[in-house]
Amino acid sequence: MEAHIKWLSGLALAGKGSSNHWVPMDGPEKNGGFNAATRPLELLLIGLGGCTGMDVLSILKKKRIQFDDFEIKLEAEQAGEYPKVFTRIKIKFIVYGKNINPQNIERAIELSENKYCSASAMLKHTAQIDTSYEIKEK
């Protein structure tokens, strides 16, 4: 895997990985940015959500679990001192549908946490990661 970061102006950057898709990044105006794009640490948290989300979705699909919608909410706490690493991350999976067996959701999350999600495996060395889920009828 590779990445390339290109400076645009101020603190604004654009980055692309091996998939060749550009992602804009920027900082707050008070630090010399334009406040025009996502912050790099936000992208890290979004990446964690995407990593575990794709795992859970793949597992549910393989188990032929029917659902109407799916979302994940993440919250991160940071250390007070630099480098201000994430110290705690809360991940909440929300699955919408009828007659969904909670054990299927729990197992999919467990497999992502303990076997498949590379982002989670890296971040759990500095942050406590707490997961929860909710099943809602839409």
Image (tube, rainbow, N blue to C red):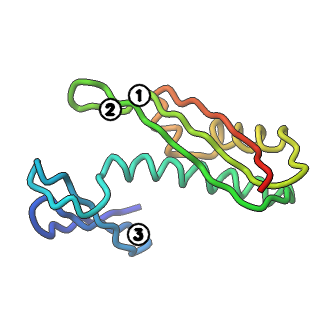
Give yes or no for contact between labels 1 and 2 (Cβ–Cβ under 8 Å): yes
* SS at mark 2 in the image: loop
Which of the marked residues, 1 or 3, is nearer the chain's N terminus? 3
Q: Which residue appears farthest toward the front when viewing the image?
A: 138
Query: What's the residue type where badge 3 is placed?
Result: Ser
SS category of the residue bearing label 3: loop
Name the residue: 78% across, 39% down: 107
Point out residue 95 in the picture as x, y percentages from the top left corner: 73, 50
Label disc, if present, on residue 18 of the rendered structure: 3
Instruction: Give residue 91's mark.
Output: none
Real-space Cα distance between discs 1 and 3? 26 Å
Left or right placement of residue 77 versus residue 91 in this view: left
Which residue corresponds to the image point at 76% horizontal and 44% vertical from the top-left? 135
Residues 19 and 56: in front is 56
Which residue carries the number 1 mark? 126
Q: Secondary structure at mark 1?
A: loop
Q: Are marks 2 and 3 in contact (CB under 8 Å)?
A: no
Amino acid on which disc 1 is placed: Thr
Gap in angstroms between the C-alphas marked 2 and 3: 26 Å
- Pointer 1 with pointer 3, Cβ within 8 A: no
Closer to the observer: label 1 or label 3?
1
**Which one is earlier in the sequence, the residue at label 1 or at label 2?**
2
Q: Quadrant of residue 6?
A: bottom left
Q: Quadrant of the N terminus?
A: bottom left
Query: What residue appears at the point 51 percent right and 42 percent down from the top-left corner?
Result: 74
